[in-house]
Image (tube, rainbow, N blue to C red):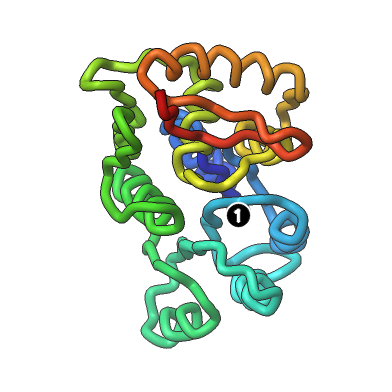
């Protein structure tokens, strides 16, 4: 499950985006000013930033400049009503990955979000395949050997996080970061329960979630 930092000071637009992103299955934190956004980007683990420019306390361009000055390559999608060529050039030179002009259609924004998150991970394609597991990042539906895989929201989030990082160990702390926004809590014991449930669904099909002691979890193919 991807985690997004929404940086927007407009309450109405922020509410609509927060609701739409969460319904699409993302974990979302909402920063309403530039200072809060800058702090969150220093401390949090995100897969994408949705960045408004006209922010109180710290302008969006400065948030972006500081992000790139820390050598952080997090995809940043700028949302702005300022459509002058000079503003677009300035944003791109500072390290913006994409621009969407306000007012925009939320389905288009969601499509851009999906595209950037796919590029940041393992595949430019909508479908990711690992052994018998096929996952569609657009519909967020998974299949095992062409049969639908029924998962709870938490199980799906864990599977997605592991699948997008195949070959890398995923820590419990990272799973908590991906599954919970600022208003939610999830303990390590709960993570273990969800991993156990997901493992039971994958093992009959030759996939396993290995526990790397002291580090975390790894999605793997079984040899038997």
Nearer to us in this view, 51 or 55: 51
Q: Quadrant of the C terminus?
A: top left
Tell whether 118 sits left or right of 42.
Answer: left
Which residue lies under the disc numbered 1?
7
Q: Residue at x 46, y 62 (%)?
A: 77
Residue 23, horizontal then vertical, whole percent: 44, 29
Residue 27, horizontal then vertical, whole percent: 57, 36
Label 1 secondary element: strand
Q: Residue at x 73, y 54 (%)?
A: 40
Residue 213, horizontal then vertical, whole percent: 74, 33
Nearer to us in this view, 71 or 210: 210
* Residue 204 appears anywhere in the view: yes
User: Label 1: how many residues lie within 10 Å, few (<14), some (14-19) or many (20+)?
Assistant: many
Q: Residue at x 44, y 72 (%)?
A: 82
Nearer to us in this view, 192 or 79: 192
Residue 121, horizontal then vertical, whole percent: 44, 53
Residue projecting furthest to the front = 224
């Amino acid at each position: 499950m991807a985690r997004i930092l929404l940086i927007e000071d407009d309450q109405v637009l922020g509410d609509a985006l927060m609701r739409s992103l969460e319904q699409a299955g993302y974990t979302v934190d909402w920063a309403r000013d530039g200072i809060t956004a800058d702090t969150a980007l220093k401390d949090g683990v995100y897969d994408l930033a949705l960045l408004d420019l006209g922010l109180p306390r710290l302008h969006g361009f400065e948030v972006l400049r500081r992000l790139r000055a820390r050598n952080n390559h997090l995809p940043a999608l700028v949302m702005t009503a300022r459509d002058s060529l000079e503003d677009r050039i300035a944003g791109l030179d500072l390290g913006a990955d994409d621009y969407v002009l306000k007012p925009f259609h939320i389905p288009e924004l969601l499509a851009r979000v999906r595209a950037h998150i796919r590029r940041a991970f393992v595949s430019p394609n909508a479908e990711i395949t690992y052994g018998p597991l096929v996952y569609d990042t657009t519909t967020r539906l998974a299949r095992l050997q062409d049969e639908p895989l029924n998962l709870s929201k938490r199980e799906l989030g864990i599977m997605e996080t592991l699948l997008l990082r195949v070959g890398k160990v995923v820590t419990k702390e990272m799973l908590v970061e991906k599954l919970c926004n600022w208003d939610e809590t999830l303990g390590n014991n709960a993570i273990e329960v969800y991993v156990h449930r997901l493992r039971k669904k994958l093992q009959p099909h030759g996939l396993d979630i290995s526990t790397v002691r002291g580090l975390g979890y790894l999605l793997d193919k079984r040899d038997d």
